Amino acid sequence: MDHTPRTPAPATPHPADQAAPWDAVVIGGSAAGLSAAQALGRALRRTLVIDSGSPRNRFAAQMHNVLGHDGTPPGELAARGRQEAARYGVVFREAAVRTVRDGDGVTGPAGDGAGSPPSVHIELDGGETVAARAIIVATGVRDELPAIPGLAEHWGSGVLHCPYCHGWEERGGRLAVITTSPLGLHQAKLLRQWSDELTVFTAGLGALDAETEALLLARGVRLVAEPVAEVRGDGSRVSAVRTATGEEYAVDAIFTASATVPRDGFLDELGLRRTETPGGAPVLAVDAMGRTSHPRIWAAGNVVTPFASVPMVMGAGTFAGAAVNAALVEEDFARAAALVAAQRSPAGAEVRDA
């Protein structure tokens, strides 16, 4: 084996030292996006977080099933996350994204080693454009609620969607499920675990088949077929559900399965692949690393997994951040090797001797 010391290759500028583009831009600054940004910041990546300031869980007073943070307000967790990420050099920008487009050489694996690497261009609502070598989309989803008077006004307080997030607090109470899709039956079965006073309003499903009806009745679930006309309450807590026939049912909490719509319309021009999801619009298709069908765009959190809880999206965000860094590491090595090869070529020698 040849142990002769080798002359090291000339140092090459690290992309993280360049003014543009950003190594990574994270679109969305809630649990998933902040987790991704923190992972990237700790990897010494120039990272920008763009956030419009309207997280999905802004209607909830507390989070649960978040180990070490049980009962913490969602906004408080996000504020801590921003402070932590900022310590690692992550930059924050309050803005909405209008569209994302391919930049020059965006599909290339590394470029030729000279100048800025390939990038994706992000146009903000004010018209400004920023460039990034990689993007992580963590914008979550929008909840589309049934058009029932009084329901939206109580969303997140008296009208809820997740038994695991709110079931303990409502245990033993008079619970109701307003069905909008087959997910409502799943909610109903789960909620029977927290209360034996459960009323399911089934009009959103149409007529129940005999087997499903018998199954619910066997555990004492009350079934109401009349359409719901109104949710009553004081703006915080609900008190009753009124049907189209005028009958009222006293309740302490209502659960309903919203239709979820991913907040990723700014990617429409790219035509990325999507996959179906129950109870909502199709979401971006991602691989095991969170990468979409675009080589420089990853996605994490509710935008691709609408039913994931806070700890789940935090883990997905961290994983996506690490995956982006790993991809950029490979690109950094490829660019450095390309630059060294160019310098050693006859054409490169002529340039050096000039």
Image (cartoon, grey):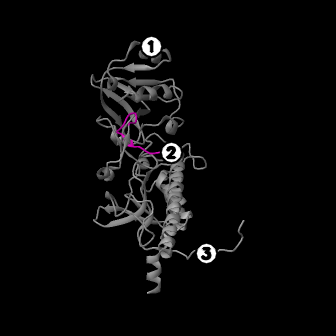
Q: What amino acid type should be assigned to the residue bearing mark 3? A: Pro
Question: Residue 151, how many percent across, how many down?
Answer: 34, 37
Name the residue at 45% across, 73% down: 18
| Residue that badge 1 annotates | 214
Residue 301 located within the stretch drawn in magenta: no
Q: Quadrant of the C terminus?
A: bottom left
Q: Which residue is mark 3?
A: 8
Whether residue 37 appears in this view of the structure is yes
Q: Is residue 123 above or below residue 163?
A: below
The image shows residue 38 at horizontal and vertical percentages of: 53, 60
Q: Residue at x 47, y 72 (%)?
A: 342
Nearest to the eye among marks 3 and 2: give it: 3
Q: Estimate the x, y position of residue 207 in percent, counting from the top left.
A: 33, 18
- Magenta region, residue range: 276-288
| Direction from residue 272 to residue 22 in the image, left or right | right
Name the image quarter holding residue 232.
top left
Residue 52 drawn above or below residue 195: below
Judged from the image, the secondary structure of the residue bearing numbered disc 2 is: loop
N-term mark: 2 or 1: 1
- Between tags 3 and 1, which lies in front? 3
- Cα–Cα span, label 3 and label 1: 76 Å
The tag on residue 154 is none
Q: Are the two marked residues, 3 and 2, in contact with CB atoms closer than 8 angstroms? A: no
Q: Label 2: which residue?
A: 288
Q: Is residue 76 visible?
A: no
Q: Which quadrant of the figure has residue 42?
A: bottom right
Secondary structure of residue under mark 3: loop
> Which residue lies most toward the front here?
346
